[in-house]
Image (spheres, rainbow, N blue to C red):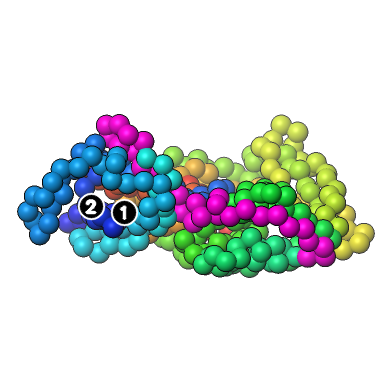
Amino acid sequence: MYVPQLEIIMNDVTFRRVNEVQIERSLKTLGATALIKIPATARLERQGEFVSEVETAKKFGRGDAVAIYAGYNGKLRLEFQGYVARVKPGTPVEIECDDAIFLLRRRNLKKSFKDTTLKALLDYILQGTFIKVVGETPVINFSKFYFTNTTAANALQKIKEEYGLTMYFRAIDELFVGLAADDDGVEVKYRFGYNVIDNNLEWMAAEDVRLKVKAIHIRKNNTKVEKTIGDADGEQRTLYFYDLPNGADLEKVAKQEILKYKFSGYKGGLNTFLLPNAAPGNVANVDDTQFDERDGKYLIDKVVTTISTGGARRKVELGLKL
């Protein structure tokens, strides 16, 4: 029998009973978040003996280090590591936590660059921190780039949005930077009726997928050329291309790239237990026990992990078919 277990270490206090913990990670957001709900008062014990009763809202504060472990039958793994962002008194007390993005909100940037690269910009943004860049960072050149009195967190968010990058904290000390379809090489197997509790998946045939795409070519001098292609009534997407060769036809290149998004496959998500472990950037290998032809591999876009008195679940959202 699998019995879910939880251990939270916060402000050097360890506790194993909470109302609920929810951890959210996504390829679309830089940082992961955790929401911890605990009773308004708690008993402190030492070696099993009652010491005192405390108001939990006063015990924890902004900036406190947080580590959340979860698993089954004593085998726990680190699910979240970060810092307390805010404490909301109430019944229960809600403690909102951020990962390493919390630290980057405190770092202010003010500098200009000429003839630089994405890698050089990332090195400057993360300078003086313990955070390293992982993944295959795209080669993007800039004739000039400015940081005008902004935080390191906002700078990363701006680069992520304006240049269409996949950028997220894979761990508290690892910032993953890559292209939209990059995966981290970790494969997670899902089999209907075996380790999938339920799902809200919808099967879509490639010929039924309608997309309206804005293609953006970013030149070396940081100027942009845009083209809109595809179905006028389709789902909107933006694709980015960097420093294409002179004479390259942006529309033609974009039409080739759009084929990746017009696939026959599943859209939606799966509900599972804590096992198997899963994270954004992993590859979901989906085994449909009723329709073999629907088996496939997908990039995992988002994972929401919930642990409460009612049990433990992961909600896994599928993205691009690989």
Indicate left or right for 190 with 119 as reference: left
Q: Residues within 10 Å of mark 2 (few under 14, many from 20)?
A: some
Residue at (47%, 42%) from the top-left corner? 201
Helix, strand or loop at mark 1:
strand
Helix, strand or loop at mark 2:
strand
Q: Quadrant of residue 125?
A: bottom right
- Direction right: furthest residue: 247
Rendered location of residue 50, percent (x, y):
8, 50
- Above/below status of 290 relative to 126: above
Q: Is residue 115 magenta?
A: yes
Indicate which disc, 2 or 1, sits on the residue closer to the N terminus: 1
Which three-letter amino acid code belongs to the residue tagged 2?
Phe
Residue at (12%, 57%) from the top-left corner? 46
Residue at (55%, 52%) from the top-left corner? 106
Which three-letter amino acid code belongs to the residue tagged 1?
Met
Specify the segment rendered in magenta.
88-116
Q: Is residue 233 visible?
A: yes
For label 2, the residue is: 15
Rendered location of residue 104, percent (x, y):
55, 54
Residue at (24%, 58%) from the top-left corner? 72
Q: Quadrant of residue 220?
A: bottom right
Rendered location of residue 141, percent (x, y):
79, 63
- Above/below status of 7 relative to 56: below
Screen quadrant of the N terminus = bottom left
For label 1, the residue is: 10
Callout 2 touching callout 1 (CB < 8 Å): yes
Q: Is residue 180 visible?
A: no
